[in-house]
Amino acid sequence: MGQSIQQTSFCAEDFRAFQGKLHHCLDALDAVLQRPDFGAGIASIGAELELYLLDSEGFPALDNLAIQQALNDPRLTLELNRYNLEFNLTPVLAAGAPFSGLEQQMLDNLSQLRTLMQHQDGTVLPIGILPTLRETDFGPQVMTDIPRYHVLAEAVRQSRDNSLGIQIDGQDSLHLIHDDVTLEGACTSFQLHYRPVVGEFVNLWNAVQLITPLMVGVSANSPLLMGHRLWQETRIPLFCQSIDGQASTSGPRCPPPRVSFGQGWLRHSPLELFRETVQLYPPLIPIVSDEEPLAVVDNGGTPKLAELCLHDGTIWSWNRPIYAAGKDPHLRIEMRVLPAGPSAADMAANAALFIGLAEGLAGEVEPLLSALPFSCAQQNFYRAAQFGLAAKVYWPNARQNGLSEMLLADVLEQLLPLAGKGLAKIGVNPSELTKWLALIDERLRRRQTGASWQLRQYNRLLEKRLSPQEASQCLVRDYCQLSQSNTPVARWPAL
């Protein structure tokens, strides 16, 4: 969502030109992908960390522009809502100790931002959804005032279905009438970018899709929204419905929603994923560049494919292919499903598990795809978001004779050694992989995620006769202290 634009109004001819240019981009990308040296390079890992800004009472602070200007770091970017910021971590090599490197970057950046917020008696917090959010924290008045977000908000409003607001079932089901894209801004994430070794994209992509439900369950950190106890990972239905309307989480749709788990297993080439974005989704922001991508390819260059990249940024699949031009052109996988928080250590451990499992399964994923219809993988995804570690999921076995359910936590316990092998395969140091997978093992043994801890604390506070708002404020205060100490969530005590 963060790409800068200047043009804010468009005519029918703009859309026709943009649509034609998208197909030229696809033809150019097809030619580029056939070059034997495209994407050649060393595997690397990057990340984007989205954050909340809080005031002294634990409520959202509308200070993102002031904090961005004060820090003056190009890696810090504005988000949709004025109480959110995003820090783009510097990519690290996958070999060695990459997750310790990412953890240290997060700790350093969070420390800098907390220092700036302390001047305003506030702080910064990595959490999937802030429990103290109120209905007044949404609407045009909280949107970051830059052209892209105003254009995008209007385009999304016109493209979504006719259902207004949010309908999420849970212990305290929520029905909110609100026709506004700023609801999406409640969802803050820790988005991984993984550049794999060239030639392994298809199997790795399918492995990432297969394990994404497991990652949703083990990393869940968004159980509360405006005093309502909803899903373990409420970001999933909230993001879907804020962009596509209530019907987006009720089953298969045609045309497909712009926020989705995907359309099926990848068959032959990453080009299929980019074709889907062009062929299935109408453009929202039709800005046409001067580049002629096919001419660039014919002259031996690497095109920027600006239209394709812009269009791809208005389709929010939970896993997304990224085409990067520039000095080192390549493809990478953006894994968008992880929530922010609870601690830097937890986010580093989640990254290690995600990439380790993907690499560990990539070499053996093909016979598993016929054992799990994609619709069942999608069902796993929503079950994991709703029930977390306690979700029952279908897990494939190449020797099976029919589908069977397993507890998500049990599947992960069985797969942990495979994650270690996957990390070793890409050159992660033995001590590094042992350190981070041990944190996941501890989380599984104690059955404590950020979501389960928040819910237990919230319920205790309600039993003490606190109001939902008072309980949310106390919860956020305690969460802030534990998160800032960088204690892994498996060790967070009852307070």
Image (spheres, grey):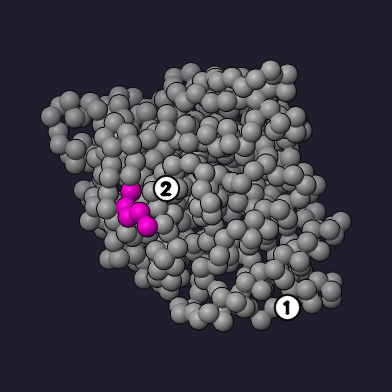
Camera-side residue of 178 and 375: 375
- What secondary structure is marked by label 2? helix
In this view, the residue in front, 39 or 259, is 259
* Relative side of 270 to 377, left or right: right
Question: Looking at the picture, does residue 208 appear above or below residue 34?
Answer: above
Residue 215 in picture, x, y percent from top left: 54, 34
Q: Residue at x 79, y 77 (%)?
A: 295
Position of 345 compared to 200: left or right? left
Residue 381 position in % (x across, y down): 52, 36
Q: CA distance from mark 1 to mark 2?
A: 39 Å
Q: Are marks 1 and 2 in contact (CB under 8 Å)?
A: no
Type of amino acid under label 1? Glu
Residue 426 within the segment the image draws in magenta: no
The disc, 1 or 2, on the residue closer to the chain's N-terminal end is: 2
Residue most extreme to the left? 465
Residue tagged 2: 247
In the image, residue 484 lies at what x, y percent? 38, 40
Helix, strand or loop for disc 1: loop
| Mark toward the viewer: 1 or 2 | 2
Q: Residue at x 29, y 31 (%)?
A: 171
Stretch in magenta = 162-166
Q: Position of residue 431 (x, y in %)?
A: 64, 28
Question: Which residue is drawn at the image coordinates 51% and 68% (left, top)?
Answer: 284
Does the magenta run of residues contain 165?
yes
Q: Quadrant of residue 469?
A: top left
- Residue designated by label 1: 292
Whether residue 114 can be seen here: no
